[in-house]
Image: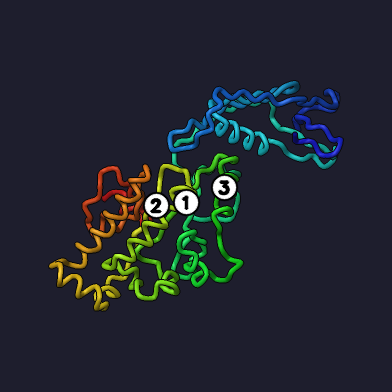
Amino acid sequence: MFKKEDYPMIPYNWSTTDNRPSRSSLNKVVIDIKTTDDHLDMDTDESYILTVPISGEAVLQAETVYGALHGLETLSQLVQYYPERRSYYIPNVPWKISDFPKYKHRGILLDTSPLSWNKLNVFHWHMLDSTSFPYVSKKYPELAAKGAYSPRHVYTAMDIKKIVQYAKERGVRVIPEMEAPGHSTAWGYELTKYVAPLNIAHPKTKEVVYGLIDEWAELFPDSFFHAAGDEVIMQCWSNDTYITDHLQKNNQTLIQLFEEFVLDMEDHVRQKNKTVIVWQEMLLEYHFNLPKDTVIQVWIGSEGVKE
């Protein structure tokens, strides 16, 4: 597995004298996985035990395939190249490594570097933002046609399925984040009447958002769904006559309308059997009455965790 051309993988101890046996090698890696269930979620067992002897067979034991993936990554990181012998070796053998994650959720917001090399298991995909709407929606294709950087800079449903499968094969879950109602300038290239940021008073806005949620719920199998809600410029709504007229007609404040939009959006996500994640402003700044099972993600400093 780790051989290069005809060079055997050999454990090598730098402190050993020259009269030691010239070579000893691992001839096999035995992988023992307890279950064939490949479901990947927050509570998936990712532990493993890796035993590497001086010679013979290395043994990797894991409860799930994802623990085995992490164990193989650790094994690959033990292997080093010895240029004088033009061969690979594992220093300081024997090894017995019993490893498991301290945190169930070990992720990044967005990083093009390989997650699996660092044994991260969550890809939090912030796909949409003010500058670009790259998702090619089946129901609303014009959002990407007018909102993406170019026709080449898009993600189709097939692209997303391939990314999700590629991630799963490396033990990584993909959690999508749908930025709404803020970070939505790119939506407005198609929905010109409904962005201020997103016009949360207009029925068309909910129709489109819910339609996109329906599509993403099928494309992303993970049980978590990020509904965002951060960095909303309230002054834009205050200056929008459609919204101010709606508030006056319904005897609402802007915060009440905002909360109604957020809770309705969350409820639609829950109907897809997803747990909702939102950014901290929803609770700590706007004090919305969020359902108790909502996951609050803190990003503005550690003080938010204490609150």
Foreground tag (3 vs 1): 1
Q: Secondary structure at mark 2?
A: strand
Query: On the image, which quarter does residue 202 sit in?
Result: bottom left
Earlier sequence position, callout 3 versus callout 2: 3
**CA gap, disc 2 and disc 1:** 8 Å
Q: Which residue is mark 2?
A: 226
Name the residue rendered at 49%, 60% in the picture. Answer: 137
Asked whether the residues under the numbered discs 2 and 1 touch, taking CB atoms below 8 Å apart as contact, a structural biologist would say yes
- Does 84 sit left or right of 247 as displayed? right
Q: Which residue is mark 3?
A: 115
Residue 179 can be seen in this image: yes
Q: Secondary structure at mark 3?
A: loop
Name the residue rendered at 74%, 25% in the picture. Answer: 28
* Amino acid type indicated by mark 3: Leu
Front residue of this view, candidates 25 and 164: 164
Asked whether the residues under the numbered discs 3 and 2 touch, taking CB atoms below 8 Å apart as contact, a structural biologist would say no
Q: Which residue is mark 1?
A: 124
Name the residue rendered at 40%, 49% in the picture. Answer: 225
Name the residue rendered at 25%, 50% in the picture. Answer: 290
Asked whether the residues under the numbered discs 3 and 1 touch, taking CB atoms below 8 Å apart as contact, a structural biologist would say no
* Amino acid type indicated by mark 2: His
Earlier sequence position, callout 2 versus callout 1: 1
Residue 98 can be seen in this image: no
**10 is higher (above) or lower (below) than 176:** above
Foreground tag (3 vs 2): 2
Foreground tag (2 vs 1): 2
